[in-house]
Amino acid sequence: MTVLKTSLRNFLAHKGRMALSAVAVLLSVAFVCGTLVFTDTMNATFDRLFANTAADVSVGPKKNDDAQQTGRPETVPASLQAKLAKVEGVAKVEPSADSQQLTVVDGKKKSLSPTSGAPTVGVNWDESQKKSVEITSGHEPHGPAETVLDSDTADKHGVKTGDTLRVIAAPGDFSVKVVGIATFKTTNPGAALFYFDTPTAQAKLLGTTDGFSGYGLTAVSGVSDEQLKERVAAALGSSADDYALRTAAESKEENKKDVGSFLDVMKYALLGFAGIAVLVGIFLIVNTFSMLVAQRTREIGLMRAIGSSRRQILRSVLVEAVLLGVVGSVLGIGGGVALAVGLMKLMGSMGMKLDMSELTIKAATPVVGLVIGVFVTVLAACLPAFKATRISPMAALRDAGTPADGKAGKVRTVIGLVLTAAGGLALVAAAKADDAAAGSGMLGIGVFLTLVGFVVVGPLLAGFVVRVISAIVLRAFGPVGRLAERNALRNPRRTGATASALMIGLALVAALSVVGSSMVASATDQLDKSVGADFIVQTENQQPLSPAVVKAVKSAGHVGHLTEYTFVNAKITTPDGKTATQRLSAVTPTYADDVRAETVKGNLKDAYAKDAMSVPEGFAKDHGVKVGDRLKVAMVDGKTAQLTVKAVTSDDTSIDKGAMYTNIATARSYLPADKMPLDFMLLAKAADGQTKDAAAALKASVEEYPQVKVRDQSDYKKLIQDQVGQLLNMIYGLLALAIIVAVLGVVNTLALSVVERTREIGLLRAIGLSRRQMRRMIRLESVVIALFGALLGLGLGMAWGTTSQKLLALQGLGVLDIPWPTITAVFLGSAVVGLLAALVPAFRAGRMNVLNAIATD
């Protein structure tokens, strides 16, 4: 009980010094709990949505991942409806006709599709829709010229009843009038929904009047879903294997798989960044307790002198850590809920309306947050606590602070150098690897060992690097600069630990910057080397081009030639007797001019002859394929062809790496017209000297189709740069949490250092150091520490990024590009961060009363 009272008294006495460490725990726990609450809320929300919309038993087409991308959904026969209605136990059969392969535009030719990446869904209106939405304005759709859309899409785009919209789908375009607005009863999943009457949805979305997307069966009272499913299977007989039969529970689980995979990726990515923040927080807590123990050396010595055992001292420090962990974790749990609410609002701005009443906080979430917060805090405090037990009773007669342990420093240095060297060798091995999988494993080992090595050897590096930085940065500030340098070098371990926290976040930033910049540079280089086409025509949402779009583009003037590009799925049997489903790039012969693919054997133009094809170099080696071989190619949903290999293409590229080429006319000759995939992309070459006219003509041809974009090579390069930039900015935003925690570490170190040097500060002020000079000294010390951490982090990150690029070179991304402007900006930004971190500690140091400071023990 005495130990507990002492710990509590010490904790409360130093609560100001503990505050920033508590903030670090708070942020780390908040990120973990916020992620769990947000993903649990999303899962629970979708569970309710799927439960409300699932039929007792559903009958649909069997999932076929290898189906040709025709732009038309798979269907089941319309004649099946009568057969299902006769099954004993079926109360009602509701056919569904839906498609996500459509674009809807308003009168201003503006697409109404979500910008979040969620789909645009067209579906028939029936009684089952009333489970999830209700028409709050207008009436249900009747006839081929009417539609109802969801209220969120209507509000976002200013659509109201009476407006005319145009629907662009694979079977053809058609115009409809908005006759109603539907409001979701549960969560809007973010999609744009358009409802049509059943015959219209069949004919205009599915492209057939003889099929449906599936059927929803309602069971009569007293018949379970499982019983009804068994009866349906019995009624269908041997043909039951041709359909996907699911109960409501199974439909719910199937839908959850699609959503769950996305949510799981989001969840573990966010938890990964939370883990980085936790790791950085550990450095802050270690520093805090190390400094507190050092400042209480005399106090601990007195406790030992009056009879406190080593175990009691250990328990005293660890109890303080537990108190810090509990306080920080409790606040962090509340912060996590606030973070989850913020994420829900962010999703709402993107189109997914999540009601606050749906906020889901599982019992395990606060427990996880509390355990993580307390465990991490106690773990970080263990080393300072053990050091506290080594303070002897004689320390009560000395000034605060304990002498450095030279032996431990040498051992630490040796271990750090060994780990760093081993990590460096692993990075070199990864860079020279011929196999991406093996290289990735070595990269992971190298990253881990070099990170740990730099952290361990930090104090040794501080002695050298800080002197170099000081010689460049601080010499201009005269005696104040020299004082700042000596303060930073006074305790190399403390400086190393503080800088290491900043190093981790900046190392990841530098590594990702190098990888991202190299990806953009490699793609740009490949475009310059390989792409001869002037223009690329494709949709923004990666959907295939409708026949109407292809027809419009073909009519554009000033175009020398137009190349069609699509993918055909086929089962290929190779000479070694193996059969595998592959994707063939079916193109028109001009593709050989538009994309200059390097061949290692044969002539690529010959691969576009009738019943000919090419194979990639890796495929040829793996299966013993050579030029002149005839391969059995069974087109999915079509006939079997015997195609002659006319060329083997190089794998040393990032454009169409691993592609197999054949003439699109060859693919059409072996596939029924309704099974032929739609064009995925069009490549255009302007007529000689008519590039500007061709660009204008192509853009004018797709003016009626806002989902289609015409890009020249510079536009396409910018698209790649923007896509990579958006991803990196999102990652940088998440890494900002770890950097914020690291900055708090700098603030905390300086604040505690100022307290530790109270008498020294008083003496400096007494011999003539002004308040301004005092504040400048603290700020310069902070800048040096921040630049030290930045230098280590950026150097380490560039090594990681360079090694990663060497592995990416195996995938054709062979250009290494160091983004020096970004690296320089981050380095200079670290100096600004150091200045900001020192504002409060420097202000407090400048305000100290000189006489009181000198009198401090």
Image: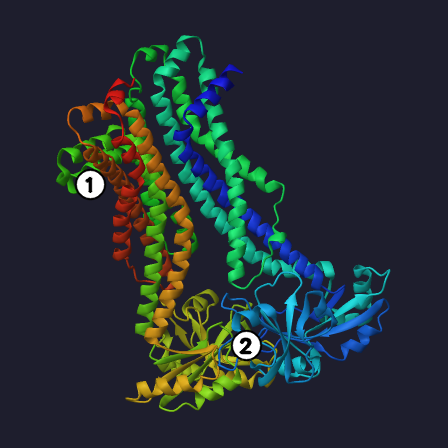
**Discs 2, 1 touching: Cβ within 8 Å:** no
Q: Position of residue 412 (x, y in %)?
A: 32, 29
**Nearer the observer, 122 or 157:** 157
Indicate left or right for 252 with 23 as reference: right
Indicate left or right for 241 with 235 as reference: left
Q: Which mark is residue 727?
A: none
Labels 2, 1: front one: 1
- Residue holding disc 2: 633
Give above or below for 131 relative to 364: below
Q: Quadrant of residue 84?
A: bottom right
Q: Position of residue 541 (x, y in %)?
A: 49, 72
User: Residue at (20%, 30%) from the top-left corner?
Assistant: 486
Q: Which mark is residue 469?
A: 1
For marks 2 and 1, the one nearer the N-term is 1
Give above or below for 558 relative to 727: below
Q: Position of residue 408 (x, y in %)?
A: 32, 24
Q: Position of residue 826 (x, y in %)?
A: 29, 51
